[in-house]
């Protein structure tokens, strides 16, 4: 055998690395996952994002034979947990469950600790939620048309509530206000339950809140739903019209839950996770659980989820400007 010298030796080593590295990477991707997968939920336990994560996590674990750990990292309007994922190793073992707050922060917060467009890679959508426009029955308003007339008769004296300033539901309330052409004052509360109680008590004239939170009050007649934000009528409230039926001028800021990975996560791994979640979302028991929460399965490919988030951020950014909102 002829000895290998000088540049020939270096070239041989380079070729060896070039051959081994892709093979090792391909093998790692093919065997994914070989250890626990972590889904970071950037909000507190017990809320809709956490509940949905804990619905799909065990199903992923059953199929993969590896633990799927749900880790709640609330704080700073979901930015704390989101930043954890942005800085994580891009290998598919750390994922973010993103909600509407991801796009709201991107549109409203000028000094995020991460880049919402460049620090993440799309994986899939999970579900689209349903919001309800509610009023207290004692207000005497029976429809969106009635609410607009009521608001225009008392400009600047109408209060509308939400689950917090600069929250996704606050943005929806602003979209309704702008489309209706009424002057209303926003009041943010610590959460959706608190806002619902204030509407129920008549201290706030209307609110746009997650359907799952206000549904029991609607069923009991304590709150009246004027419209829902879903593309079709909700099976939970089939007699309540959609916002498009009653106020088509509303610039609908798309919401819902999805999965993001750190930028640089290999596409084959993201494809695998996306397909697995799509499989789970098609299971009858999961569909039933989501429907009971007022949610609809919304799986997407990685590319589709990237496009969805970019369009969502663009829509909400325009709404922020039109509503004159500023970060606090």
Image: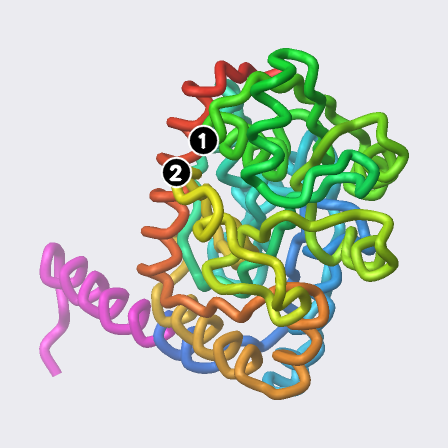
Instruction: Tell me the residue at 48%/60% (across/down).
Output: 91
- Where disc 1 sits, the SS reads helix
Q: Nearer the viewer, residue 311 or 9?
A: 311
Render colour scheme? rainbow
Can you tell which mark lies on residue 113?
none
Q: Is residue 67 left or right of residue 103?
A: right
Percent across and percent down for residue 138 are 83, 38
Instruction: Tell me the residue at 51%/83% (across/down).
Output: 279
Instruction: Tell me the residue at 87%/58% (across/down).
Output: 220
Residue marked by disc 1: 179
> Please, what is the dominant secondary structure of the magenta stretch?
helix
- The residue range painted magenta reads 1-24
Instruction: Decide: is 31 above or below 291.
Output: below
Q: Confirm or deny contact between disc 1 and disc 2 (CB under 8 A).
A: yes
Instruction: Tell me the residue at 74%/58% (across/down).
Output: 212
Q: Nearer the viewer, residue 285 or 42?
A: 285
Q: How many marks?
A: 2
Residue marked by disc 2: 249
Residue pushed farthest top? 156
Percent across and percent down for residue 119 are 43, 41
Of pointers 1 and 2, the one earlier in the residue sequence: 1
Residue at mark 1 to residue at mark 2: CA–CA distance: 5 Å
């Amino acid at each position: 055998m002829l000895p290998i010298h000088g540049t020939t030796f270096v070239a041989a080593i380079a070729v060896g690395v070039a051959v081994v590295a892709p093979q090792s990477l391909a093998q790692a991707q093919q065997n994914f996952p070989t250890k626990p997968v972590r889904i970071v939920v950037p909000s507190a336990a017990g809320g809709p994002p956490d509940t949905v994560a804990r619905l799909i996590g065990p199903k992923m674990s059953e199929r993969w034979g590896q633990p799927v750990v749900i880790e709640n990292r609330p704080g700073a309007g979901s930015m704390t947990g989101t930043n954890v994922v942005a800085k994580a190793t891009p290998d598919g073992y750390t994922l973010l469950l993103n909600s509407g707050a991801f796009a709201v922060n991107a549109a409203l917060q000028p000094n995020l600790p991460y880049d919402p467009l460049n620090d993440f890679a799309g994986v899939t959508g999970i579900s689209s939620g349903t919001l309800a426009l509610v009023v207290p029955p004692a207000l005497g308003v029976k429809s969106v048309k009635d609410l607009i007339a009521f608001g225009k008769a008392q400009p600047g004296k109408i209060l509308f509530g939400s689950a917090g300033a600069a929250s996704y539901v606050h943005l929806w309330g602003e979209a309704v206000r702008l489309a209706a052409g009424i002057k209303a004052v926003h009041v943010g509360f610590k959460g959706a339950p608190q806002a619902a109680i204030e509407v129920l008590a008549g201290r706030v004239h209307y609110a746009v809140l997650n359907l799952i939170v206000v549904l029991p009050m609607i069923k009991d007649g304590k709150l009246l739903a004027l419209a829902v934000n879903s593309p079709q009528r909700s099976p939970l409230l089939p007699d309540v019209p959609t916002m498009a039926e009653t106020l088509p001028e509303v610039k609908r800021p798309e919401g819902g839950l999805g999965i993001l990975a750190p930028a640089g996560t290999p596409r084959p791994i993201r494809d695998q996770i996306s397909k697995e979640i799509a499989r789970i979302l098609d299971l009858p028991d999961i569909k039933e659980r989501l429907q009971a929460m007022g949610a609809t399965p919304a799986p997407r490919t990685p590319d589709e989820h990237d496009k969805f988030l970019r369009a969502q951020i663009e829509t909400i950014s325009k709404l922020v400007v039109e509503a004159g909102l500023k970060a606090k």
